[in-house]
Image: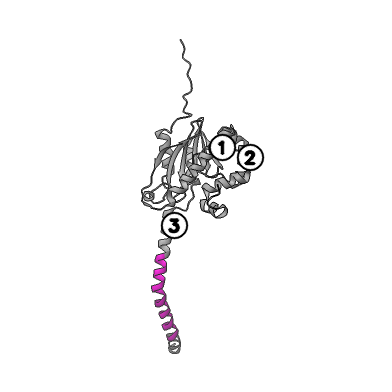
């Protein structure tokens, strides 16, 4: 949940389509992950514990759209949410690397 | 009648002005204009506050995250690696400052400028040096003959 914001003057002036896109897509991925976690009836703390994380703060970091699910724990994350690993990775790739997802699976595939 | 003194809790809610100032003071170089970095705050599902230092555009991904859980401050990087934790925010802020990737945009600009100046001066100086070297080679035998 985003509440505060500081905008650098330099970055505000920079134009470009890709600028908000990466951030927005990460946020969408975070929202999806949050829903899937709720489906699995896990709290952020539950998921963190199952993934072997000392604190659940990283789960929040990812679900708030500021970080990605690291590749090395993507499989375990999928398992804990009860989702097939390849389907989970494929779905996240759509948000994290949309162009690569399009090249690999085509525009129709989700 | 006695009053039981409860410990004043600041576990959830928002960052205090003092806390934000401490973090931002430590990260002042990292967030200086021209670096392209931004920062944002957020909360966990339990209402614990988080501070995110974001990388420059286009990614704007989290480079560092400071969270406050039960009066304890947690410093993590953008990959979820736990870098430091302590009850003292000043200490955590110092570690955050040290953990910021050091190659700043300003430093890159300075190095690029230095290379450009050096390249330009080399282009002008090199012919002069070569000319001098040729003259020297021509005059050395004559000077040797005089000696």
Nearer to us of marks 3 and 2 is: 2
Q: Is residue B129 magenta?
A: yes
Asked if badge 3 and badge 2 are on a common chain, one would say no
In the image, residue B126 sits, relative to residue B74, either above or below, namely below
Mark 3, Cα crowd under 10 Å, few <14 / some 14-19 / many 20+, is few
What's the distance in space between the residues labelled 3 and 2, CA to CA?
42 Å
The numbered disc on residue B135 is none
Task: Looking at the picture, tell me which residue is in the foreground, B43 or B63.
Answer: B43
Image label count: 3
Of residue A71 and residue B101, the one placed in the foreground of this image is A71
Q: Which residue is located at x 56 percent, y 32 percent?
A: A43
Residue reaching furthest to the bottom: B145
Start-end of magenta stretch: B116-138
Q: Residues within 10 Å of mark 1 (few under 14, many from 20)?
A: some
User: SS at mark 3?
Assistant: helix
Q: Label 3 is found on which chain of the structure?
A: B
**Subunit that carries the residue with mark 2:** A
Between B133 and B109, the one nearer to me in the picture: B109
Task: Identify the residue position indicated by label 3 in the image.
Answer: B108
Q: Is residue A13 above or below residue B132?
A: above
User: In this view of the protein, can residue B64 be seen by the observer?
Assistant: no
Q: Residue at x 49, y 42 (%)?
A: A28
Which of marks 1 and 2 precedes in the sequence?
Answer: 1
Q: CA distance from mark 2 to mark 1?
A: 11 Å
Q: Comparing marks 2 and 1, which lies closer to the viewer?
A: 1
Residue A66, magenta (yes or no): no
> According to the image, label 2 marks what residue?
A79
Q: Main secondary structure of the magenta part?
A: helix
Residue B92 location (% of width, % of height):
49, 39
Residue A91, position in %: x, y?
A: 56, 45
Secondary structure of residue under mark 2:
helix
- Residue B22, position as x, y percentages in the image: 42, 38
């Amino acid at each position: 949940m985003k509440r505060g914001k500081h905008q650098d003057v330099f970055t505000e002036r920079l134009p470009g389509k890709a600028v908000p896109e990466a951030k927005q897509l990460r946020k969408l991925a975070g929202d999806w992950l949050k829903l899937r976690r709720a489906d699995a009836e896990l709290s952020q703390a539950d998921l963190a514990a199952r993934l072997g994380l000392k604190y659940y703060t990283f789960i929040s970091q990812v679900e708030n759209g500021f970080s990605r699910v690291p590749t090395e724990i993507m499989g375990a994350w999928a398992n804990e949410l009860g989702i097939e690993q390849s389907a989970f990775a494929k779905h996240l790739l759509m948000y994290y690397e949309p162009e690569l997802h399009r090249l690999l699976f085509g525009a129709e595939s989700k | 009648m006695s009053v039981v003194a409860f410990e004043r809790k600041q576990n959830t809610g928002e960052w205090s002005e003092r806390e934000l100032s401490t973090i931002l003071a430590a990260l002042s170089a990292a967030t200086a204009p021209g670096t392209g970095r931004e920062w944002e705050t957020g909360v966990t599902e339990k209402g614990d506050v988080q501070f995110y230092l974001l990388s420059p555009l286009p990614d704007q991904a989290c480079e560092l995250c400071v969270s406050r859980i039960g009066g304890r401050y947690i410093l993590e990087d953008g990959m979820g690696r736990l870098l430091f934790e302590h009850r003292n925010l000043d200490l955590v802020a110092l570690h955050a400052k040290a953990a910021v990737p050091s190659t700043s945009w300003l430093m890159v600009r300075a190095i690029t400028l230095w290379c450009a100046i050096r390249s330009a001066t080399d282009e002008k100086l090199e012919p002069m040096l070569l000319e001098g070297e040729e003259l020297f080679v021509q005059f050395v035998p004559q000077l040797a003959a005089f000696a």
